[in-house]
Image (cartoon, rainbow, N blue to C red):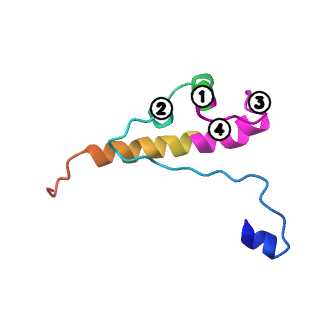
Amino acid sequence: TRALREAGLPAPALLVVGACPPPDAATGPADACRAPDEELLRLLGGFVSLPGGTEPGGLWHRVVMPVLRDDLLLADALRTDARRPSPAGP
């Protein structure tokens, strides 16, 4: 965003950042990646202050929720695969 500002361009309308904890760490959001939207939103609300539009049909729900769910599904798959023994050995 700094490069955009320095170039005199507008800032992004939305900036979303995702991360994945280590495979051996328990995590609420990644573990709830297949939960219904309402349950996932309740869980997320316990971690962060959610913006307006999170209700079904709202802008955040329509734009961010699908990307967030895909990110959580990817994190869950990566953590699951990381816990499996390698067929090639240690």
Q: CA distance from mark 3 to mark 2?
A: 24 Å
Q: Earlier in the sequence, mark 1 or mark 3?
A: 1
Please tell me whether residue 74 is drawn above or below residue 35 in the rendered image. below
Q: CA distance from mark 2 to mark 4?
A: 16 Å
Q: CA distance from mark 1 to mark 3?
A: 21 Å
Judge the density around disc 3: few (<14), some (14-19), many (≥20) Cα neighbours within 10 Å: few
Picture residue at 17% right of the left edge, 53% below the top: 87
Q: CA distance from mark 1 to mark 2?
A: 10 Å
Q: Quadrant of the N terminus?
A: bottom right
Q: Which of the pair 21/53 is nearer the observer?
A: 21
* Residue placed under numbered mark 3 in the picture: 57
Q: Which contiguous range is marked in magenta?
A: 45-68
Q: Earlier in the sequence, mark 1 or mark 2?
A: 2
Which numbered mark, 3 or 2, is in the foreground of this view?
2
Judge the density around disc 2: few (<14), some (14-19), many (≥20) Cα neighbours within 10 Å: few
Amino acid of disc 4: Met
Dots 1 and 2: beta carbons under 8 Å? yes
Residue 80 x, y percent position in the rendering? 34, 42
Answer whether residue 58 is magenta in the image.
yes
